[in-house]
Image (cartoon, rainbow, N blue to C red):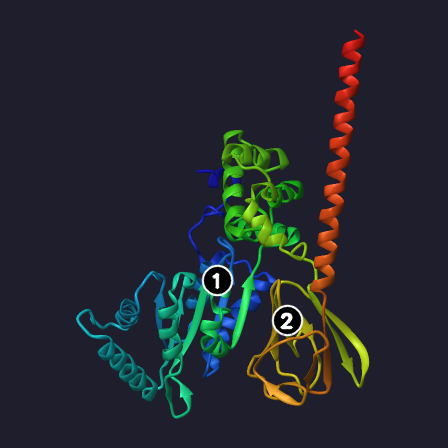
Amino acid sequence: MYCELFQLTEPPFRLTPDPQFLFASKQHSRAKAYMESTIWLADGFVVITGEIGAGKTTLIESFLAELPEDILLAHISQTQLTPVEFLQALLVEFGFKPFRKRKVELLAMIKDFMIEQYAAGKKILLIIDEAQNLSRKVLEEVRLLSGLEAQKEKLLRIILAGQPELSRKLDSPRLQQLTQRVRLRFHLSALSKRETHEYITHRLNVAGAKGRKIFTDAACDMAFRYAGGVPRLVNVICDTAMLCAFAEEQTTVDETTVKAAAEELQWVEFSERMSEQERNELTGEYGPVNAAVARFDVLFQDQLVAELNLKVGRAIIGRTPDNDLQIRSKFISRHHAQIVSDRNRSVVEDLNSTNGVFIKSKRVKHHELADGDVIQLGEHKLLYRDMRSTLAARVRQQELDDDDDDADDDELDQDADEAEAAVGEEK
């Protein structure tokens, strides 16, 4: 509708996933690199999570568009399945019609097919989108399939993609065996304000803007305030803003136009739209989500060389610059280990590194950290300091201060009421 006015070849903010519009932010590039690792790692098993609208599906579509010819793909997006239905869906992806088979027959068919393809030099990749909906029993089937081997090489490479509930499900004790098989995990968060500017500009250029400034900087700022950096919401408000500009025959989208679009959508600013539950999840028991719950002092030859604050989520440690903590050492793998932190604990997980992760001279794959633990990575030591009790005390003190402020306000209100009553009596 508005493409002719803005001299564009196609609408830039459509909601349907389109690989050519993928915005390669730092985190999206890293997530895609993790997905690509499933191709060249014999035991590739990657989990990608992100909020609704964070761009997971577009990322997957971009990844699929570049798959080499020796990859056989099974892409499952309908995930509310029983274990038998899941196995049937997998076989359907490979061209079978297994609808009257028992479970044992389904498993035999899958294994025989994978061995046959392995012998033919093919690699098999299973991608499960919306994986947060998988039941624990189906996830157990995924675990069993991930263990199928031929000549000490895994027959199946796996990518699970889903909303944050997937991470919480995988972290449950009942799924510990599955989690230990996962090689890499990554969470896609919302775009920053700067990235939102770049995202809007990128999509406009792909659609034919050729560098023309259609959205002013103030308009991009306003879009970020209402969309919170969530790509899908950015698309919605930017598309609506362009329609509003079209109605006014304006060739530039400014701050006022974006605000008009928000009113048309009946949106309030993103921070005000969050429900109380979402606020609690972001704030948490130990303060704001961006507050550090723990930290590492990084030591080399017993000298402090760096620090890493651990927030709720994941931090990757490795040799290359794309890690949260880069340690330049020949003893450190490209992606060596990850630290998974929540409100209650931090866990270190070895990402199948060459030289391993050691605590108290013992090599560990998965270890819950305690305050004062020292992790040995090659020649470097990471001293773990848990800060949750300090944060909890700070939050409790803030609550007490808020209660005192409320009490003072109530007292002032009461004094004002009494004074008003007294004036009334005098009158």
Residue type, numbered disc 2:
Asp
Q: Residue 65: which quarter of the image?
A: bottom left
Residue depicted at 45% across the width and 72% down the height: 174
Q: Residue 312: which quarter of the image?
A: bottom right
**Of the image marks 1 and 2, the number of the one nearer the N terminus:** 1
Residue 233, percent across and down?
Answer: 52, 47
How many numbered marks, from 0 up? 2
Q: Residue 190: which quarter of the image?
A: bottom right
Q: Is residue 66 in view?
A: no
Picture quarter with the N terminus: top left
Residues 419 and 89: in front is 419
Residue depicted at 55% across the width and 36% down the height: 262
Q: Which label sits on residue 59?
A: 1
Residue farthest to the left? 100
In the rendered image, which residue does mark 2 sit on?
322
Residues 311 and 209: in front is 311
Residues 219 and 222: in front is 222
Picture quarter with the C terminus: top right
